[in-house]
Amino acid sequence: MSPKILITNAKIENSELLLTTDFETDLGDFAATGQMLVDSDQLSFIYIIDKEDGYHYITIPAGTWSVIQEGLQAGLETFLANDGGKLKLDGFHSEMEYLIANITGNSNYGEEMVAKVEQVFAAPSA
């Protein structure tokens, strides 16, 4: 099982979307993959990063989604951040858009996940 890194906070700072974690390591040792998954059971998005010893899963819980939505709407670059620096999460915006579109109205992800995604990421009415 690949190690998990839990996002504890999301914030917009200096025109960047920062996903912060208490995970203590030098983020310079990691590479962004531009790939994401969904964990419907935990109401989370998962961004995959790579390190010499294998993949690590960044768990992005529902409590951070409203700030992420703000960052997506503003077109901000997204970074994983901790006391050891920050790592640009390549492809985050496009992967999130793809997953949100795929989850919306799709009962395969479970009612609770679909409802939460639709609630947080629903496009504003024109």
Image (cartoon, rainbow, N blue to C red):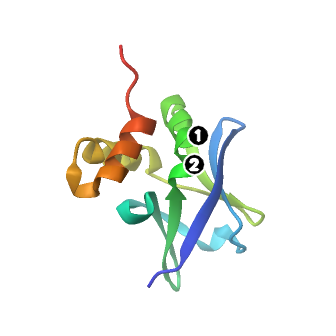
Q: Could you tell me the amino acid type at mark 1?
A: Val
Dot 1 alpha-carbon crowd within 10 angstroms: few under 14, some 14 to 19, many 20 or more: some
- Which quarter of the figure has residue 33? bottom left
The residues bearing labels 1 and 2 have C-alpha atoms spaced at a distance of: 6 Å
| Rendered residue at 39%/60% (across/down) | 36
Residue 56 sits above or below residue 20 on the image:
below
- Residue 54 coordinates in the image, percent (x, y): 48, 82
- Left or right of 111? Residue 92 is right
- Residue 66 coordinates in the image, percent (x, y): 54, 39
Residue 14 in sight here: yes
Q: Quadrant of the N terminus?
A: bottom left
| Rendered residue at 57%/48% (across/down) | 64
Mark sitting on residue 64: 2
Does the CB distance between marks 1 and 2 fall below 8 Å?
yes
Q: Quadrant of the C terminus?
A: top left
| Rendered residue at 75%/66% (across/down) | 84
| Rendered residue at 46%/61% (across/down) | 47
- Left or right of 70? Residue 33 is left
Q: In the rendered picture of this protein, how many numbered marks are placed on residues?
A: 2
Write down the residue under mark 1.
Answer: 67
Dot 2 alpha-carbon crowd within 10 angstroms: few under 14, some 14 to 19, many 20 or more: some
**Residue extending farthest right:** 83
- Which quarter of the figure has residue 87? bottom right
> In what element is the residue under mark 2?
helix
- In depth, the one of 119 and 125 nearer the eye is 119
- Residue 110 coordinates in the image, percent (x, y): 28, 56
- Which quarter of the figure has residue 100? top left
